Image (spheres, rainbow, N blue to C red):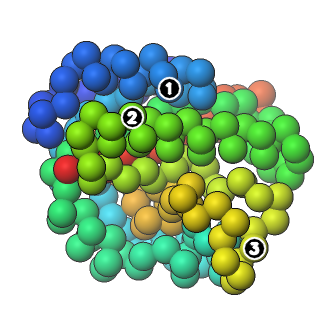
């Protein structure tokens, strides 16, 4: 599946094209194919996304990075009001492992998770002290989450994009692109992370 069209570069957070390139180069070793800066007002927060988490996912109320342990849509809107810009992280995966619950799938999720957090750290060291990651996969740092006991990796704990009530497809449409849903096990699909900047 092709990556989304390049979103016109916006320098609203003062992030340089050179830094975006460095982040992109660093992200490649974690399976990220592209990084696009965009304005925070393009993010689509929707109540129905929270419903999908609550009624369509077995991670609900079993994981520190999923609802109800993550902010509700109203709180998310309040948090986003403190930011102006963000980065869209784009990767792609084979669909064949999507419904499997095995070590290979988990290793891919952890790789994505750690990659996103490493880019957040790079941004922090560049002076973007408000940078905060929304990861493009469910948390798989532990084989089984300690929830409701204390998280074993509190410094790496981050919500996924969807658990933050973000309508990914709606956000992509606001950015002038879209994503095809994989319908066959031989398909590949794109996954998306977001790093809030400032």
The residue carrying pointer 1 sits among few (fewer than 14), some (14 to 19) or many (20 or more) residues within 10 Å by Cα, namely many
Q: Position of residue 195 (x, y in %)?
A: 37, 46
Task: Residue at 55% x, 36% y: name it.
Answer: 115
- The answer to which quarter of the image holds residue 110 is top right
Sequence order check, earlier mark of 3 and 1:
1
Is disc 1 placed on a helix, strand or loop? helix
The residue carrying pointer 2 sits among few (fewer than 14), some (14 to 19) or many (20 or more) residues within 10 Å by Cα, namely some
Name the residue at the right extreme: 102
Task: Residue at 59% x, 45% y: name it.
Answer: 113
- The answer to which quarter of the image holds residue 21 is top left
Whether residue 194 sits left or right of residue 163 in the image: it is left
Q: Are marks 2 and 1 in contact (CB under 8 Å)?
A: no
Whether residue 23 sits left or right of residue 97 in the image: it is left
Q: Nearer the viewer, mark 2 or mark 3?
A: 2
Q: Which residue is mark 1?
A: 27
Sequence order check, earlier mark of 2 and 1:
1
Q: Position of residue 123 (x, y in %)?
A: 33, 37
Q: Which residue is mark 2?
A: 122
Q: Using the image as rendered, state which of residue 54 and residue 113 is in the foreground.
A: 113
Q: CA distance from mark 2 to mark 3?
A: 28 Å
Q: Position of residue 104 (x, y in %)?
A: 84, 38
- The answer to which quarter of the image holds residue 57 is bottom right
* 20 to 13, vertically: above or below: above
Q: Which residue is mark 3?
A: 146
* 191 to 170, vertically: above or below: above
Task: Residue at 61% x, 34% y: name it.
Answer: 189
Is disc 3 placed on a helix, strand or loop? loop
* 85 to 82, vertically: above or below: above
Q: Nearer the viewer, mark 2 or mark 1?
A: 2
* 31 to 195, vertically: above or below: above
Q: Position of residue 106 (x, y in %)?
A: 78, 46
Q: CA distance from mark 2 to mark 1?
A: 11 Å
């Amino acid at each position: 599946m092709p990556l989304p069209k390049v979103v016109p570069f916006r320098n609203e957070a003062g992030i340089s094209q050179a830094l975006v390139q460095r982040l992109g180069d660093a992200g490649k070793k974690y399976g990220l194919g592209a990084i696009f800066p965009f304005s925070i007002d393009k993010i689509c927060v929707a109540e129905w996304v929270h419903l999908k988490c609550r009624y369509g996912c077995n991670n609900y109320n079993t994981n520190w990075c999923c609802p109800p342990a993550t902010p509700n849509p109203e709180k998310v809107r309040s948090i986003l009001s403190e930011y102006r810009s963000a980065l869209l992280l784009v990767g792609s995966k084979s669909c064949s492992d999507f419904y499997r619950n095995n070590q290979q799938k988990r290793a891919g999720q952890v790789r994505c998770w750690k990659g996103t957090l490493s880019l957040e750290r790079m941004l922090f060291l560049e002076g973007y002290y408000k940078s905060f990651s929304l990861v493009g996969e469910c948390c798989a740092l532990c084989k089984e989450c300690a929830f409701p006991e204390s998280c074993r990796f509190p410094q790496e704990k981050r919500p996924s994009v969807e658990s933050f009530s973000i309508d990914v497809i709606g956000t992509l449409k606001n950015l002038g692109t879209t994503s095809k849903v994989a319908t066959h096990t031989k398909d590949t699909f794109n996954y998306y992370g977001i790093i809030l900047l400032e």
